[in-house]
Image (tube, coloured by chain):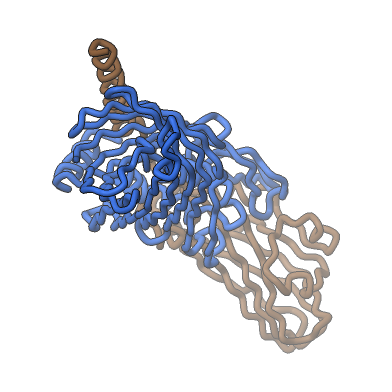
Chain colours: A brown, B blue
Amino acid sequence: MKALSKTFALTLATLHLGLTMVCMQGCDLAMNPLIFDGTPVEATFPVISPVTLFPPLVYSVDLEDILSESDNAVDSIKAYNITMLIDNPGAANLALTCNMTVNGDTLLTMNNTPASALASERTIFDSKLTALGLSYSPTIVPTINGYLKQNPKPRVTVLVSGVGTPAPLNFTIHVKLYSQVFTGS
Amino acid sequence: MNMENRFQYMSFVVSLAGLIFIGGSMHGQAQDGVEDAIRQVSAENVRGYVQPFVNGLGASLNSGWYQSAAIGDMGFHIRLQVIASGTLIGDADKTYGALPPEPFERTPVETATLFGDRGTVVDGPGGTTYQFQNGQVRTRIFPSATLQLSIGNLFGTQAVLRYVPVPEIDNFPRTTFFGFGARHSISQYLPSSPVDLAAGFFTQQLIIGDIMKVNAFAFGGQVSKSLSVVTFYGGLQYESSTLTLSYTSSSTNSRVNTDIDSENHVRATAGIGLDFTILNLNTDVSLGKVVVVSSGISFGL
Protein backbone atom coordinates (compact mmCIF):
# COMPACT_ATOMS: atom_id res chain seq x y z
CA MET A 1 0.00 0.00 0.00
CA LYS A 2 2.87 2.33 0.87
CA ALA A 3 4.53 1.70 -2.50
CA LEU A 4 1.22 2.24 -4.25
CA SER A 5 0.72 5.52 -2.44
CA LYS A 6 4.22 6.63 -3.35
CA THR A 7 3.59 5.82 -7.01
CA PHE A 8 0.33 7.74 -6.95
CA ALA A 9 2.01 10.64 -5.21
CA LEU A 10 4.74 10.80 -7.83
CA THR A 11 2.20 10.48 -10.62
CA LEU A 12 0.05 13.25 -9.25
CA ALA A 13 2.99 15.50 -8.52
CA THR A 14 4.24 15.01 -12.07
CA LEU A 15 0.81 15.72 -13.51
CA HIS A 16 0.43 18.74 -11.33
CA LEU A 17 3.78 20.18 -12.21
CA GLY A 18 3.21 19.40 -15.86
CA LEU A 19 -0.14 21.11 -15.96
CA THR A 20 1.20 24.12 -14.12
CA MET A 21 4.06 24.39 -16.60
CA VAL A 22 1.59 24.17 -19.45
CA CYS A 23 -0.51 26.85 -17.80
CA MET A 24 2.45 29.17 -17.58
CA GLN A 25 4.09 28.48 -20.91
CA GLY A 26 1.49 26.94 -23.14
CA CYS A 27 0.07 30.21 -24.38
CA ASP A 28 1.66 32.19 -27.16
CA LEU A 29 0.00 35.57 -26.89
CA ALA A 30 -0.41 38.31 -29.48
CA MET A 31 1.16 36.00 -32.03
CA ASN A 32 -0.30 37.75 -35.07
CA PRO A 33 -0.36 41.45 -35.88
CA LEU A 34 -3.57 43.26 -35.19
CA ILE A 35 -5.66 44.68 -38.00
CA PHE A 36 -7.35 47.99 -37.31
CA ASP A 37 -9.93 49.95 -39.21
CA GLY A 38 -8.47 53.20 -40.39
CA THR A 39 -10.35 56.38 -39.59
CA PRO A 40 -12.61 57.00 -42.61
CA VAL A 41 -11.57 60.07 -44.59
CA GLU A 42 -14.13 62.10 -46.45
CA ALA A 43 -14.40 64.62 -49.23
CA THR A 44 -17.40 66.95 -49.20
CA PHE A 45 -18.69 69.00 -52.12
CA PRO A 46 -21.48 71.50 -51.48
CA VAL A 47 -23.10 72.43 -54.76
CA ILE A 48 -25.20 75.58 -55.01
CA SER A 49 -25.84 76.79 -58.53
CA PRO A 50 -28.68 78.67 -60.27
CA VAL A 51 -27.94 76.74 -63.48
CA THR A 52 -27.46 73.07 -64.28
CA LEU A 53 -23.74 73.34 -64.86
CA PHE A 54 -21.69 73.53 -61.71
CA PRO A 55 -18.04 74.56 -61.75
CA PRO A 56 -15.25 72.12 -60.76
CA LEU A 57 -15.19 71.66 -57.00
CA VAL A 58 -11.98 70.65 -55.26
CA TYR A 59 -11.43 69.02 -51.89
CA SER A 60 -8.07 68.17 -50.40
CA VAL A 61 -7.95 64.95 -48.35
CA ASP A 62 -5.04 64.25 -46.02
CA LEU A 63 -4.56 60.47 -46.11
CA GLU A 64 -2.47 60.72 -42.94
CA ASP A 65 -5.80 61.29 -41.14
CA ILE A 66 -6.51 57.57 -41.60
CA LEU A 67 -4.06 57.01 -38.76
CA SER A 68 -5.45 59.73 -36.51
CA GLU A 69 -6.82 57.27 -33.98
CA SER A 70 -4.04 54.72 -34.19
CA ASP A 71 -1.01 54.62 -31.94
CA ASN A 72 0.30 51.32 -33.25
CA ALA A 73 3.28 50.66 -35.44
CA VAL A 74 1.82 50.59 -38.92
CA ASP A 75 2.99 48.13 -41.54
CA SER A 76 0.59 48.98 -44.35
CA ILE A 77 -2.83 50.44 -45.20
CA LYS A 78 -5.27 49.20 -47.80
CA ALA A 79 -8.52 50.71 -49.01
CA TYR A 80 -11.45 48.33 -48.92
CA ASN A 81 -14.48 50.51 -49.63
CA ILE A 82 -15.48 53.85 -51.10
CA THR A 83 -18.95 55.14 -50.39
CA MET A 84 -21.03 58.01 -51.63
CA LEU A 85 -23.94 59.94 -50.23
CA ILE A 86 -25.86 62.84 -51.74
CA ASP A 87 -27.61 65.09 -49.30
CA ASN A 88 -30.27 66.72 -51.42
CA PRO A 89 -32.75 69.11 -49.84
CA GLY A 90 -33.52 70.49 -53.33
CA ALA A 91 -35.47 68.99 -56.21
CA ALA A 92 -36.51 65.41 -55.51
CA ASN A 93 -35.91 64.37 -59.12
CA LEU A 94 -32.33 65.61 -59.19
CA ALA A 95 -30.09 63.65 -61.56
CA LEU A 96 -26.36 64.07 -61.97
CA THR A 97 -24.01 63.68 -64.88
CA CYS A 98 -20.54 64.28 -63.61
CA ASN A 99 -16.98 63.11 -63.28
CA MET A 100 -14.95 62.69 -60.09
CA THR A 101 -11.17 62.37 -60.02
CA VAL A 102 -8.40 61.78 -57.49
CA ASN A 103 -5.23 63.64 -58.42
CA GLY A 104 -6.46 63.60 -61.99
CA ASP A 105 -7.26 59.89 -62.11
CA THR A 106 -10.91 59.07 -62.62
CA LEU A 107 -12.64 57.81 -59.49
CA LEU A 108 -16.13 57.51 -60.93
CA THR A 109 -18.50 58.89 -63.50
CA MET A 110 -22.23 59.43 -63.24
CA ASN A 111 -24.50 59.54 -66.24
CA ASN A 112 -27.94 60.91 -65.42
CA THR A 113 -27.80 59.09 -62.08
CA PRO A 114 -30.73 59.93 -59.80
CA ALA A 115 -29.52 61.52 -56.57
CA SER A 116 -32.20 59.60 -54.69
CA ALA A 117 -30.23 56.40 -55.33
CA LEU A 118 -27.53 57.82 -53.09
CA ALA A 119 -29.78 59.36 -50.45
CA SER A 120 -28.18 57.03 -47.93
CA GLU A 121 -24.51 56.09 -47.77
CA ARG A 122 -23.85 53.46 -50.40
CA THR A 123 -20.77 51.74 -51.74
CA ILE A 124 -19.80 52.86 -55.23
CA PHE A 125 -19.02 49.19 -55.97
CA ASP A 126 -22.68 48.24 -55.71
CA SER A 127 -23.44 46.60 -59.05
CA LYS A 128 -27.02 47.93 -58.92
CA LEU A 129 -25.66 51.44 -59.34
CA THR A 130 -24.25 50.53 -62.74
CA ALA A 131 -27.78 50.34 -64.12
CA LEU A 132 -28.35 53.83 -62.72
CA GLY A 133 -25.44 55.26 -64.65
CA LEU A 134 -22.74 55.22 -62.00
CA SER A 135 -19.51 53.51 -62.88
CA TYR A 136 -16.23 53.44 -61.01
CA SER A 137 -12.76 53.23 -62.45
CA PRO A 138 -11.34 49.69 -62.09
CA THR A 139 -7.91 51.19 -61.45
CA ILE A 140 -8.83 53.66 -58.73
CA VAL A 141 -8.38 51.29 -55.76
CA PRO A 142 -4.86 50.23 -56.82
CA THR A 143 -4.11 53.92 -57.41
CA ILE A 144 -5.28 54.91 -53.93
CA ASN A 145 -3.42 51.96 -52.41
CA GLY A 146 -0.33 53.32 -54.13
CA TYR A 147 -0.79 56.63 -52.28
CA LEU A 148 -1.32 54.72 -49.04
CA LYS A 149 2.05 53.02 -49.45
CA GLN A 150 3.82 56.37 -49.28
CA ASN A 151 5.29 57.69 -46.05
CA PRO A 152 4.14 60.13 -44.90
CA LYS A 153 0.75 59.65 -46.47
CA PRO A 154 0.14 62.42 -49.01
CA ARG A 155 -2.71 64.83 -49.46
CA VAL A 156 -4.77 64.00 -52.51
CA THR A 157 -7.02 66.31 -54.46
CA VAL A 158 -10.51 65.11 -55.19
CA LEU A 159 -12.31 67.02 -57.91
CA VAL A 160 -15.88 66.82 -59.13
CA SER A 161 -17.47 68.64 -62.08
CA GLY A 162 -20.56 68.19 -64.21
CA VAL A 163 -24.20 69.05 -64.46
CA GLY A 164 -27.28 68.44 -62.41
CA THR A 165 -30.87 68.69 -63.50
CA PRO A 166 -33.19 70.39 -62.84
CA ALA A 167 -31.73 73.73 -61.83
CA PRO A 168 -31.35 75.42 -59.44
CA LEU A 169 -28.94 73.05 -57.70
CA ASN A 170 -28.63 72.73 -53.95
CA PHE A 171 -27.06 69.50 -52.76
CA THR A 172 -23.93 68.11 -51.13
CA ILE A 173 -21.87 65.13 -52.28
CA HIS A 174 -20.04 63.13 -49.63
CA VAL A 175 -17.39 60.60 -50.68
CA LYS A 176 -15.80 58.46 -47.98
CA LEU A 177 -12.81 56.13 -48.06
CA TYR A 178 -12.65 53.12 -45.71
CA SER A 179 -9.40 51.32 -45.10
CA GLN A 180 -7.70 48.66 -43.01
CA VAL A 181 -4.52 49.37 -41.10
CA PHE A 182 -2.14 46.45 -40.72
CA THR A 183 0.19 46.69 -37.75
CA GLY A 184 3.74 45.45 -37.73
CA SER A 185 4.37 41.85 -36.73
CA MET B 1 5.24 36.07 -25.13
CA ASN B 2 8.81 37.34 -25.32
CA MET B 3 11.35 37.02 -22.53
CA GLU B 4 10.76 40.53 -21.23
CA ASN B 5 7.03 40.01 -21.03
CA ARG B 6 7.54 36.64 -19.43
CA PHE B 7 9.81 38.20 -16.82
CA GLN B 8 7.29 40.97 -16.13
CA TYR B 9 4.62 38.36 -15.88
CA MET B 10 6.60 36.25 -13.43
CA SER B 11 7.52 39.33 -11.38
CA PHE B 12 3.91 40.28 -11.24
CA VAL B 13 2.86 36.86 -10.08
CA VAL B 14 5.50 36.86 -7.37
CA SER B 15 4.49 40.36 -6.27
CA LEU B 16 1.04 39.10 -5.55
CA ALA B 17 2.63 37.40 -2.56
CA GLY B 18 0.86 34.16 -2.89
CA LEU B 19 -2.33 35.35 -4.52
CA ILE B 20 -1.60 33.19 -7.47
CA PHE B 21 -3.99 33.63 -10.27
CA ILE B 22 -2.08 32.52 -13.27
CA GLY B 23 -5.08 32.28 -15.50
CA GLY B 24 -6.25 35.76 -14.80
CA SER B 25 -2.75 37.08 -15.29
CA MET B 26 -2.37 35.40 -18.63
CA HIS B 27 -5.81 36.48 -19.69
CA GLY B 28 -4.78 39.95 -18.61
CA GLN B 29 -1.55 39.89 -20.58
CA ALA B 30 -3.50 38.86 -23.60
CA GLN B 31 -6.24 41.31 -22.87
CA ASP B 32 -4.73 44.32 -24.60
CA GLY B 33 -4.37 42.39 -27.82
CA VAL B 34 -7.62 40.57 -27.32
CA GLU B 35 -9.50 43.75 -26.48
CA ASP B 36 -8.06 45.61 -29.46
CA ALA B 37 -8.80 42.67 -31.72
CA ILE B 38 -12.39 42.44 -30.52
CA ARG B 39 -12.97 46.16 -31.02
CA GLN B 40 -12.21 45.66 -34.72
CA VAL B 41 -14.65 42.82 -35.16
CA SER B 42 -18.15 43.78 -36.26
CA ALA B 43 -21.12 43.01 -34.03
CA GLU B 44 -22.31 40.29 -36.41
CA ASN B 45 -18.95 38.48 -36.26
CA VAL B 46 -17.81 38.99 -32.70
CA ARG B 47 -19.78 36.02 -31.38
CA GLY B 48 -18.02 33.58 -33.67
CA TYR B 49 -14.64 35.20 -33.09
CA VAL B 50 -14.73 34.87 -29.30
CA GLN B 51 -16.98 31.78 -28.83
CA PRO B 52 -14.06 29.35 -28.29
CA PHE B 53 -12.57 31.83 -25.82
CA VAL B 54 -15.84 31.90 -23.89
CA ASN B 55 -16.06 28.10 -23.96
CA GLY B 56 -12.51 27.75 -22.68
CA LEU B 57 -12.70 30.43 -20.05
CA GLY B 58 -16.08 29.31 -18.77
CA ALA B 59 -15.06 25.67 -18.57
CA SER B 60 -11.85 26.56 -16.78
CA LEU B 61 -13.63 28.78 -14.27
CA ASN B 62 -16.14 26.05 -13.50
CA SER B 63 -13.38 23.56 -12.73
CA GLY B 64 -11.64 22.50 -9.55
CA TRP B 65 -14.38 23.23 -7.06
CA TYR B 66 -14.15 19.86 -5.32
CA GLN B 67 -11.66 17.08 -4.76
CA SER B 68 -13.77 14.81 -2.60
CA ALA B 69 -17.39 14.35 -1.58
CA ALA B 70 -16.48 13.66 2.03
CA ILE B 71 -17.68 16.49 4.27
CA GLY B 72 -17.78 16.06 8.01
CA ASP B 73 -20.95 16.87 9.93
CA MET B 74 -19.50 19.38 12.41
CA GLY B 75 -15.96 20.54 13.18
CA PHE B 76 -13.32 22.97 12.08
CA HIS B 77 -12.15 22.66 8.49
CA ILE B 78 -10.03 25.11 6.54
CA ARG B 79 -8.12 24.46 3.37
CA LEU B 80 -6.25 26.72 0.99
CA GLN B 81 -5.85 25.41 -2.50
CA VAL B 82 -4.09 26.40 -5.68
CA ILE B 83 -5.94 25.05 -8.70
CA ALA B 84 -4.64 24.98 -12.23
CA SER B 85 -6.93 23.93 -15.03
CA GLY B 86 -6.74 23.86 -18.76
CA THR B 87 -9.37 23.50 -21.47
CA LEU B 88 -8.17 21.67 -24.55
CA ILE B 89 -8.38 23.74 -27.72
CA GLY B 90 -9.03 21.70 -30.87
CA ASP B 91 -8.84 22.59 -34.54
CA ALA B 92 -12.59 23.23 -34.61
CA ASP B 93 -12.07 26.06 -32.15
CA LYS B 94 -9.71 27.87 -34.49
CA THR B 95 -12.07 28.87 -37.31
CA TYR B 96 -15.59 30.20 -37.74
CA GLY B 97 -17.81 31.53 -40.51
CA ALA B 98 -17.63 35.32 -40.72
CA LEU B 99 -19.54 37.78 -42.87
CA PRO B 100 -17.41 40.30 -44.76
CA PRO B 101 -18.53 43.93 -44.86
CA GLU B 102 -19.74 45.81 -47.93
CA PRO B 103 -18.80 45.82 -50.77
CA PHE B 104 -17.82 42.16 -50.47
CA GLU B 105 -20.15 39.26 -51.16
CA ARG B 106 -22.20 38.73 -48.01
CA THR B 107 -21.69 35.01 -47.62
CA PRO B 108 -19.90 33.41 -44.64
CA VAL B 109 -16.17 32.98 -45.02
CA GLU B 110 -14.13 30.61 -42.89
CA THR B 111 -11.57 32.62 -40.95
CA ALA B 112 -9.60 32.66 -37.72
CA THR B 113 -11.13 32.84 -34.27
CA LEU B 114 -9.25 34.33 -31.37
CA PHE B 115 -7.41 30.99 -31.17
CA GLY B 116 -6.86 30.81 -34.93
CA ASP B 117 -4.00 31.88 -37.14
CA ARG B 118 -4.16 34.54 -39.85
CA GLY B 119 -7.48 36.06 -40.86
CA THR B 120 -8.77 35.10 -44.29
CA VAL B 121 -8.38 37.61 -47.13
CA VAL B 122 -11.37 38.07 -49.43
CA ASP B 123 -11.36 39.79 -52.80
CA GLY B 124 -14.04 42.26 -53.75
CA PRO B 125 -15.01 44.45 -56.70
CA GLY B 126 -12.67 47.02 -58.15
CA GLY B 127 -9.54 45.38 -56.77
CA THR B 128 -10.60 45.75 -53.16
CA THR B 129 -9.49 43.21 -50.55
CA TYR B 130 -10.50 42.71 -46.95
CA GLN B 131 -8.70 40.72 -44.29
CA PHE B 132 -10.54 39.44 -41.25
CA GLN B 133 -8.94 39.92 -37.86
CA ASN B 134 -6.05 37.62 -37.05
CA GLY B 135 -6.07 35.14 -34.17
CA GLN B 136 -4.34 36.41 -31.06
CA VAL B 137 -3.74 33.40 -28.85
CA ARG B 138 -1.95 30.28 -30.00
CA THR B 139 -2.39 27.45 -27.57
CA ARG B 140 -3.51 23.85 -27.40
CA ILE B 141 -4.73 24.30 -23.86
CA PHE B 142 -6.51 27.33 -22.44
CA PRO B 143 -5.09 27.76 -18.95
CA SER B 144 -6.55 29.13 -15.80
CA ALA B 145 -5.53 28.99 -12.19
CA THR B 146 -6.94 30.32 -9.00
CA LEU B 147 -6.63 30.38 -5.27
CA GLN B 148 -9.47 28.79 -3.36
CA LEU B 149 -10.39 28.64 0.31
CA SER B 150 -12.82 26.17 1.77
CA ILE B 151 -14.20 26.62 5.29
CA GLY B 152 -16.50 24.42 7.36
CA ASN B 153 -17.98 22.24 8.57
CA LEU B 154 -21.40 23.24 9.79
CA PHE B 155 -24.12 20.63 9.60
CA GLY B 156 -22.24 18.89 6.82
CA THR B 157 -21.77 22.08 4.84
CA GLN B 158 -18.64 23.77 3.53
CA ALA B 159 -18.29 27.24 2.04
CA VAL B 160 -15.87 27.72 -0.84
CA LEU B 161 -14.40 31.10 -1.75
CA ARG B 162 -12.33 32.44 -4.62
CA TYR B 163 -11.14 36.03 -4.65
CA VAL B 164 -8.32 37.80 -6.45
CA PRO B 165 -8.24 41.58 -6.99
CA VAL B 166 -5.56 42.61 -9.47
CA PRO B 167 -4.89 46.35 -9.77
CA GLU B 168 -3.96 48.01 -13.03
CA ILE B 169 -0.20 47.88 -13.45
CA ASP B 170 1.32 49.40 -16.60
CA ASN B 171 -0.35 47.60 -19.49
CA PHE B 172 -1.81 45.05 -17.15
CA PRO B 173 -5.54 45.72 -16.94
CA ARG B 174 -7.48 45.91 -13.74
CA THR B 175 -8.90 42.47 -13.07
CA THR B 176 -11.32 41.40 -10.38
CA PHE B 177 -12.20 37.83 -9.71
CA PHE B 178 -14.64 36.66 -7.07
CA GLY B 179 -16.45 33.41 -6.58
CA PHE B 180 -18.23 31.55 -3.88
CA GLY B 181 -20.14 28.36 -3.40
CA ALA B 182 -21.31 25.81 -0.89
CA ARG B 183 -21.23 22.05 -0.70
CA HIS B 184 -23.46 19.90 1.45
CA SER B 185 -22.98 16.31 2.45
CA ILE B 186 -25.68 14.00 1.17
CA SER B 187 -24.17 10.83 2.52
CA GLN B 188 -24.77 12.01 6.11
CA TYR B 189 -28.42 11.19 5.43
CA LEU B 190 -27.47 7.79 4.01
CA PRO B 191 -25.42 6.09 6.73
CA SER B 192 -25.18 2.85 4.79
CA SER B 193 -23.85 4.46 1.66
CA PRO B 194 -20.56 2.84 0.59
CA VAL B 195 -19.40 6.08 -0.96
CA ASP B 196 -19.43 9.72 0.06
CA LEU B 197 -21.98 11.90 -1.69
CA ALA B 198 -22.34 15.66 -1.80
CA ALA B 199 -24.07 18.38 -3.76
CA GLY B 200 -23.05 21.94 -4.30
CA PHE B 201 -23.36 25.16 -6.25
CA PHE B 202 -20.77 27.71 -7.26
CA THR B 203 -20.98 31.16 -8.77
CA GLN B 204 -18.24 33.55 -9.81
CA GLN B 205 -17.51 36.72 -11.70
CA LEU B 206 -14.38 37.75 -13.55
CA ILE B 207 -13.99 41.32 -14.80
CA ILE B 208 -11.07 41.92 -17.15
CA GLY B 209 -10.30 45.46 -18.24
CA ASP B 210 -12.94 47.72 -19.67
CA ILE B 211 -14.96 45.59 -22.00
CA MET B 212 -15.11 42.04 -20.67
CA LYS B 213 -17.08 40.51 -17.84
CA VAL B 214 -17.62 36.81 -17.28
CA ASN B 215 -20.29 35.33 -15.04
CA ALA B 216 -20.15 31.62 -14.36
CA PHE B 217 -22.47 29.32 -12.45
CA ALA B 218 -22.38 25.62 -11.73
CA PHE B 219 -24.21 23.10 -9.63
CA GLY B 220 -23.99 19.36 -9.39
CA GLY B 221 -23.48 16.20 -7.42
CA GLN B 222 -20.23 14.63 -6.32
CA VAL B 223 -19.19 11.17 -5.28
CA SER B 224 -15.95 9.92 -3.80
CA LYS B 225 -14.39 6.87 -2.24
CA SER B 226 -11.27 7.00 -0.10
CA LEU B 227 -8.92 4.05 0.20
CA SER B 228 -6.22 4.91 2.69
CA VAL B 229 -4.60 8.09 1.39
CA VAL B 230 -6.01 7.70 -2.09
CA THR B 231 -9.35 9.25 -3.00
CA PHE B 232 -11.21 8.52 -6.19
CA TYR B 233 -13.78 11.16 -6.97
CA GLY B 234 -16.13 12.25 -9.68
CA GLY B 235 -19.32 14.07 -10.38
CA LEU B 236 -21.89 15.41 -12.74
CA GLN B 237 -22.25 19.13 -13.14
CA TYR B 238 -24.55 21.52 -14.92
CA GLU B 239 -22.89 24.81 -15.68
CA SER B 240 -23.25 28.05 -17.57
CA SER B 241 -21.01 30.97 -18.24
CA THR B 242 -21.62 34.20 -20.08
CA LEU B 243 -19.17 36.70 -21.47
CA THR B 244 -20.58 40.21 -21.58
CA LEU B 245 -18.85 42.45 -24.09
CA SER B 246 -19.43 46.17 -24.09
CA TYR B 247 -17.45 48.29 -26.53
CA THR B 248 -17.61 50.55 -29.55
CA SER B 249 -16.91 48.66 -32.75
CA SER B 250 -14.23 50.42 -34.77
CA SER B 251 -15.45 48.86 -37.99
CA THR B 252 -18.97 50.23 -37.70
CA ASN B 253 -18.46 52.91 -35.05
CA SER B 254 -21.51 51.49 -33.31
CA ARG B 255 -21.93 50.50 -29.69
CA VAL B 256 -21.84 46.74 -29.15
CA ASN B 257 -23.37 45.25 -26.04
CA THR B 258 -23.61 41.52 -26.32
CA ASP B 259 -23.79 38.47 -24.11
CA ILE B 260 -22.10 35.34 -25.40
CA ASP B 261 -22.98 32.11 -23.65
CA SER B 262 -20.58 29.24 -23.29
CA GLU B 263 -21.58 26.11 -25.17
CA ASN B 264 -20.46 23.91 -22.28
CA HIS B 265 -23.43 22.99 -20.10
CA VAL B 266 -22.97 19.49 -18.74
CA ARG B 267 -19.80 17.76 -17.67
CA ALA B 268 -18.77 14.49 -16.11
CA THR B 269 -15.67 14.57 -13.96
CA ALA B 270 -13.36 11.78 -12.81
CA GLY B 271 -10.34 12.35 -10.65
CA ILE B 272 -7.92 11.03 -8.15
CA GLY B 273 -6.40 12.62 -5.10
CA LEU B 274 -3.86 11.97 -2.41
CA ASP B 275 -4.62 13.04 1.13
CA PHE B 276 -1.60 13.52 3.37
CA THR B 277 -3.73 15.23 6.02
CA ILE B 278 -2.21 18.68 5.72
CA LEU B 279 -1.07 18.37 2.12
CA ASN B 280 -3.44 17.22 -0.59
CA LEU B 281 -2.82 16.67 -4.28
CA ASN B 282 -5.42 15.97 -6.92
CA THR B 283 -5.90 15.72 -10.65
CA ASP B 284 -9.08 15.25 -12.65
CA VAL B 285 -10.46 15.38 -16.13
CA SER B 286 -13.89 16.65 -17.16
CA LEU B 287 -15.71 15.69 -20.32
CA GLY B 288 -18.41 17.83 -21.87
CA LYS B 289 -18.60 20.07 -24.90
CA VAL B 290 -14.95 20.74 -24.12
CA VAL B 291 -12.37 18.70 -22.25
CA VAL B 292 -10.90 20.24 -19.12
CA VAL B 293 -7.92 18.94 -17.16
CA SER B 294 -7.59 20.25 -13.62
CA SER B 295 -5.00 19.80 -10.94
CA GLY B 296 -4.67 21.15 -7.45
CA ILE B 297 -2.45 21.32 -4.45
CA SER B 298 -3.87 22.28 -1.08
CA PHE B 299 -2.90 22.81 2.50
CA GLY B 300 -5.17 22.75 5.50
CA LEU B 301 -6.87 20.94 8.28
Residue B130 x, y percent position in the rendering:
59, 46
Q: Is residue A36 above or below residue B14?
A: below
Q: Where is residue A41? Give x, y as percent.
A: 52, 64
Q: Which of A38 and B190 lies nearest the eye of the viewer?
A: B190
Choose top left, top right, bottom left or bottom right for residue B284: top left
Instruction: Determine the image quadrant of residue A12.
Output: top left
Residue at 43 percent of width and 51 percent of height = B201
Q: Position of residue B287 (x, y in %)?
A: 52, 32
Query: Is A3 above or below relative to A60?
Result: above
Q: Is residue A95 visible?
A: yes
* Front in this rendered view, residue B7 or A80: B7
- Quadrant of the snapshot with the C terminus of chain B: top left
How many numbered marks does the figure carry? 0
Residue placed at 70% from the left, 72% from the top?
A120
Image check: B103 left or right of B89?
right
Residue B10: x, y in percent? Answer: 19, 39
Give the residue displayed 33% in from the left and 42% down from the top. B71
Residue at left offset 43%, top offset 45%: B189
Inspect this view and state whether residue A146 appears.
Answer: no
